[in-house]
Amino acid sequence: MGAKLLCLLLTSVLLAYYLYTPIPEDFEEPWKVMLITASFRAVGHLAEVADRLGLMHYMEALMLITAAEYIAPTSDENVTVSDTEFSGVAVRLYLPRRATDGLRRAVVYFHGGGWCVGQAGMKSYDHLTRWTSNKLNAVVVSVNYRLAPKYHFPVQFEDVYSVTKFFLQSSVLSQYGVDPDRVCVAGDSAGGNLAAAVAQQLLEDTEVKTKLKAQALLYPALQALDLNLPSYQKNENKPILPRSLMVKFWSEYFTSDPSLREAMASNRHVPVESSHLFQFVNWSTLLPEELKKGHVYAHPAYGSPELAQKYPGFLDARAAPLLTSDARLRGLPLTYILTCEHDVLRDDGVMYAERLRAAGVPVAHDHAKDAFHGAMMFVSSPAELAVGHRLLNGYIKWLDENL
Ligand SMILES: *[C@@H]1O[C@H](CO)[C@@H](O)[C@H](O)[C@H]1NC(C)=O
Ligand SMILES: *[C@@H]1O[C@H](CO)[C@@H](O)[C@H](O)[C@H]1NC(C)=O
């Protein structure tokens, strides 16, 4: 009896310790956030164990959540949903059923998941894109680009680029009844990264005649040069994207070679030969005073040139859109950027908004002070958060008014 009681006590203490994450005071529904965080942490730990035991790659273990959340394409009274291919790349297509007088708007959407996990058919993404299609009476193309560790950069980028290019052909737009003047790219997290990169690349592609009306970047990852920005330091252990996981995602985008991950973890991966690129991510000039508070700008530390020679992707603007020159930013379309205060990627988005504005691009920047990375995904039960609905409504409202 005594032993059983002791066991129970020990288990409860361990469970409480596991569940306990300091949740910032301004979060609504702190208990729900704590449970969500604990579940993500548990999956992360299991993936780590599976990887160490040699059972499967860390990212393949994380991919099991994606599989568990998968739902087949299901049409409803408002939207016809189907899985198909555009230009050889898998996409999930949402076509509104509601009658319309004229042509429709369209959103080409890229899901998040660190270029390694995620799926257009995950319950949360399916909900988001279906909602977008229904609310805006818009055609939505949600792209199932290929993922790491099986495929590395630039495959992810090339997949989303070729889908976008295919869709922007006038014959394809007219087949779906889409107005060529009202098409945007959008994405969250790694998907926001891909959307920003696609919008930049389209500016230089003389084969594409249709111009994007807008880009919407939801808590995007935009650079891998400086992984010690104030937001990385301040939010190192915030839900649901700790710095260590973001470092894994970034390095895995380019290679499974652990030496890049280790160099990125200590922020010594950029060779001195590329030091000129630091001007594009210089938080000391690009962040507003209130976000710089308590941080001292230090000269970047440099790494060996070999890593950059082997894996030049992390210095490539197609992987890190913040590394693009001001002159190239000038032609970009109307931009929506959402950033969350409690997010390692906060400063990527804030700095991009600042650089786009300086380049004369019209930018709407929503900064959610009480939100964490990925919050917009939590809009259906059982993991439903009020803050998720608020962010989603802000994004849809902007699209409705600007696309
Ligand atoms: C269809 O759209 C209407 C109006 O927006 C909404 O009330 C209804 O819940 C939608 N149906 C589904 C299955 O989402
Ligand atoms: C960043 O900006 C500061 C001034 O705010 C400057 O002293 C520093 O040299 C800049 N660093 C780089 C790498 O551009």
Image (cartoon, grey):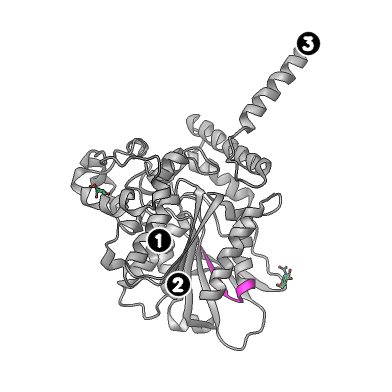
Whole-number angstrom distance, CA of label 2 to CA of label 3 = 66 Å
Q: Secondary structure at mark 1?
A: helix
Q: Amino acid at mark 3?
A: Gly
Label 1: which residue?
353
Residue 2 bears which disc, if any? Answer: 3
Label 2: which residue?
214
- The quadrant where ligand 1 appears is bottom right
Q: Amino acid at mark 2?
A: Ala
Q: Secondary structure at mark 2?
A: strand
* Quarter holding residue 165: bottom left
Whole-number angstrom distance, CA of label 2 to CA of label 1 = 14 Å
Q: How many marks?
A: 3
Query: Do the CB atoms of the residues marked 2 and 1 lie less than 8 Å apart?
Result: no
Q: First in sequence: mark 2 or mark 3?
A: 3
Q: Could you say which is closer to the camera, residue 389 or residue 246? A: 389
Whole-number angstrom distance, CA of label 3 to CA of label 1 = 61 Å
Q: Residues within 10 Å of mark 2 (few under 14, many from 20)?
A: many
Q: State the image coordinates of residue 88 (x, y, percent, origin top left).
A: 45, 67
The magenta-colored residue range is: 135-143
Does residue 21 lie above or below 166 as drawn?
A: above
